[in-house]
């Protein structure tokens, strides 16, 4: 086999890249400027080239005069005589040493990433994978479709960023379950160039433990909400029982006391003025006690809620609240009673009580409006006033249980009802 030699003509760029003068390189064999194993590989390509084929962007290495290894990209065409015989070549060599070193550096950096990662082309074929991913897979998977490697069902994610065009400089994050044996990963996708072609960097973050913790937290929150709802049910049942006992027992005792007092008053002589004054005072106290018992039982469990329904109970409460506080109350509802379960009715009524209590204490309002409407599938419920509103910063909001209690009532008393 003919040993290929450098050309009869070399431009000055060869001097800048190789460090030799042109006259030192002309006519010398390529083997003088290459490592033996590289020359052995290239000579076969040289033979193919001389047989009439062209060379396009063939990558090889040379050794410079100072011992540096150069990476060159050769392109060449054969030169033929009139008989069609190859008599030489004409070509160019581009020094891509810095580019290769940068690429090698990038790969070295990528290999240090502690998370599994790979680089895939636009079709999802693996071009590069780092050590952690290689360890997970247990083999070199370059050239294979990425989703066949890590997804348990071997199918591409429905929201895979490879299915759409991502702009350079952006990162898309998807959450994928059923990965590497039932685990859950966040996969970060970043467009990049890799060895001259469009590619995608994929970084795999195992969030399985975090997802389990989140699910456990959600489950605990669900259990707490169910416990809260159960406690509210027990509390309302106890309120109902106490209200009935107050109404039936104390109410009857107060009635009996008034009857006894009336009997005693009927037996008094007209001349007992001092006793009559005292009796009148006791009568007044009995009336106040009866009013207190009535208000207490109404607060604990409004009788109208059980007998006349939610709409009438709310309207009656607004009338009494306005009379007690001087705050004008407006009630916007449709005619007819709302058809809601008992736990929803009591939940809404308690929210009205708490909201109006907050208005009286903090809002300094002169007007309150309550809207209560029912549609086919929902209840529209709104309370607003013309008061001060909430502070501008969350840190200034009172850390009480009023709003939190209303939120829990909505979550447990209303939304859990089908």
Image (tube, rainbow, N blue to C red):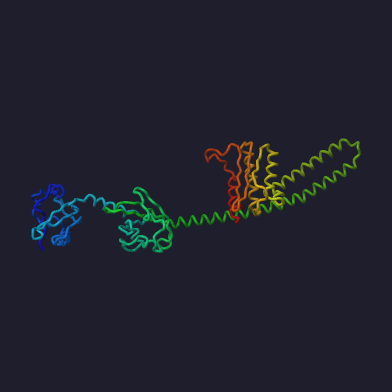
Residue 97, percent from left and from top: 21, 51
Rendered image quadrant of residue 273? top right
Residue ranking furthest to the front: 82
Quarter of the figure with the C terminus: bottom right
Residue sitting at x 58%, y 36%: 388
Give 91 or 210, whichever is nearer the viewer.
Answer: 91
What is the quadrant of the N terminus in the image?
A: bottom left
Q: Position of 243 compared to 136: left or right?
A: right
Above or below: residue 98 compared with residue 388: below
Q: Residue 292 appears in which quarter of the rendering?
A: top right
Relative side of 364 to 49, left or right = right
* Rendered view: 204 above or below 403: below
Q: Position of residue 338 (x, y in %)?
A: 65, 51
Image x and y of residue 17, in percent: 16, 49
Quarter of image, res 164 = bottom left
Give the total number of marks visible in the rendering: 0
| Relative to 254, residue 54 above or below | below
Q: Where's residue 214, x and y in %? A: 49, 55
């Amino acid at each position: 086999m003919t040993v290929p030699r450098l050309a009869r003509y070399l431009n000055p760029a060869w001097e800048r890249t190789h460090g030799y003068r042109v006259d030192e390189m002309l006519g010398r064999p390529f083997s003088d400027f290459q490592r033996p194993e590289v020359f052995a590989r290239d000579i076969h390509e040289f033979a193919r080239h001389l047989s009439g084929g062209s060379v396009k962007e063939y990558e090889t290495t040379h050794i410079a005069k100072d011992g540096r290894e150069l990476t060159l990209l050769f392109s060449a065409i054969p030169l033929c005589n009139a008989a069609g015989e190859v008599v030489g070549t004409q070509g160019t060599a581009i020094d891509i040493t810095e580019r290769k070193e940068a690429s090698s550096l990038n790969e070295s950096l990528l290999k240090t990433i502690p998370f599994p990662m790979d680089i895939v082309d636009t079709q999802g074929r693996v071009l590069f994978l780092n050590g952690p991913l290689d360890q997970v897979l247990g083999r070199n998977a370059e050239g294979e479709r990425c989703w066949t490697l890590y997804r348990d069902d071997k199918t591409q994610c429905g929201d895979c960023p490879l299915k759409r065009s991502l702009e350079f400089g952006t990162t898309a994050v998807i959450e994928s379950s059923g990965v590497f044996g039932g685990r859950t990963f966040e996969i970060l996708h970043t467009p990049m160039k890799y060895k001259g072609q469009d590619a995608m960097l994929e970084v795999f973050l195992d969030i399985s433990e975090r997802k389990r913790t989140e699910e456990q937290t959600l489950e605990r929150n669900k259990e707490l909400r169910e416990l809260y709802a159960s406690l509210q049910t027990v509390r309302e049942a106890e309120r109902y029982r106490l209200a009935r006992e107050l109404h039936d027992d104390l109410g009857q005792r107060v009635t009996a006391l008034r009857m006894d007092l009336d009997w005693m008053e009927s037996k008094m002589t007209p001349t007992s003025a001092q006793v009559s004054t005292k009796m009148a005072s006791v009568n007044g106290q009995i009336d106040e006690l009866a009013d207190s018992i009535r208000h207490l039982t109404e607060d604990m469990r409004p009788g109208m809620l059980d007998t006349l329904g939610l709409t009438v109970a709310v309207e009656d409460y607004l009338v009494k609240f306005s009379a007690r506080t001087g705050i004008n109350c407006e009630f916007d509802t449709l005619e007819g009673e709302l058809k809601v379960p008992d736990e929803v009715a009591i939940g809404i009524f308690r929210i009205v009580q708490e909201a109006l209590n907050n208005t009286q204490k903090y809002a300094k309002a002169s007007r309150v409006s309550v809207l209560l409407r029912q549609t086919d599938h929902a209840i529209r419920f709104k309370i607003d006033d013309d008061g001060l509103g909430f502070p501008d910063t969350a840190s200034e909001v009172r850390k009480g249980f009023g709003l939190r209690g209303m939120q829990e009532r909505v979550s447990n008393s209303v939304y859990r009802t089908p």
